[in-house]
Image: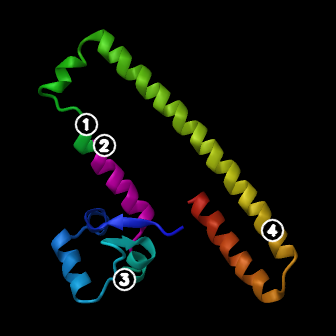
Amino acid sequence: MARLLTLAKAARLLGITRTALQREIRDGKIDTFEGQILVTELERAYPSIDLDRSAMVERARFIKDNALSRRGQGKELSDPERLQERVAKLQNDLAAANIQLRWYAEILEELLLKMQDLQDNCNREQEIVIASITAWLRYKVEN
């Protein structure tokens, strides 16, 4: 399924303003779909973009923007009970994320096995394509 990004998120990932992105859309350099941009379109228009790195930067920005400030909200964490509640919630969130990560790892392994089965039962041209996709997938997972 194609991944869509809002214009604002796409602009942040690219490190440009939303206005600059809208100008490129208006100039026909980037196509949109129902007011959003396909990730593949972003990669086509900006082949040098590292979406994995950009996503990490975006995540870091989100965490920073939503972090508790030292003024105001930060004082409530000085209360040991609230701090304990926050730690418990973070532990639950981490446990859920680890479960999801293991699930994705299982899906990935299953996918690689299915691709190997396909590769064993296809013509030479298809075998090359499947091997290429498998190598790319393994590279992305390892790096």
Residue at (58% x, 42% y) in the render: 100
Q: Distance between the residues labelled 1 and 4?
A: 44 Å
Q: Is residue 93 visible?
A: yes
Figure check: 80 above or below 110: above
Q: What residue type is labelled 3?
A: Ala
Q: What residue type is labelled 1?
A: Ala
Q: Does the magenta stretch include residue 98?
A: no
Figure check: 84 above or below 97: above
Residue position marked by numbered label 1 in the rendering: 67
N-term-proximal mark, 4 vs 2: 2
Residue position marked by numbered label 3 in the rendering: 45
Q: Can residue 17 be seen in this view?
A: no
Residue 31 x %, y %: 34, 82
**SS for callout 1:** loop
N-term-proximal mark, 3 vs 1: 3
Residue range highlighted in magenta? 49-63
Residue at (49% x, 33% y) in the render: 94
Q: What residue type is labelled 4?
A: Gln
Q: How far apart are marks 4 and 3 (CA)?
A: 32 Å
Residue position marked by numbered label 2 in the rendering: 63
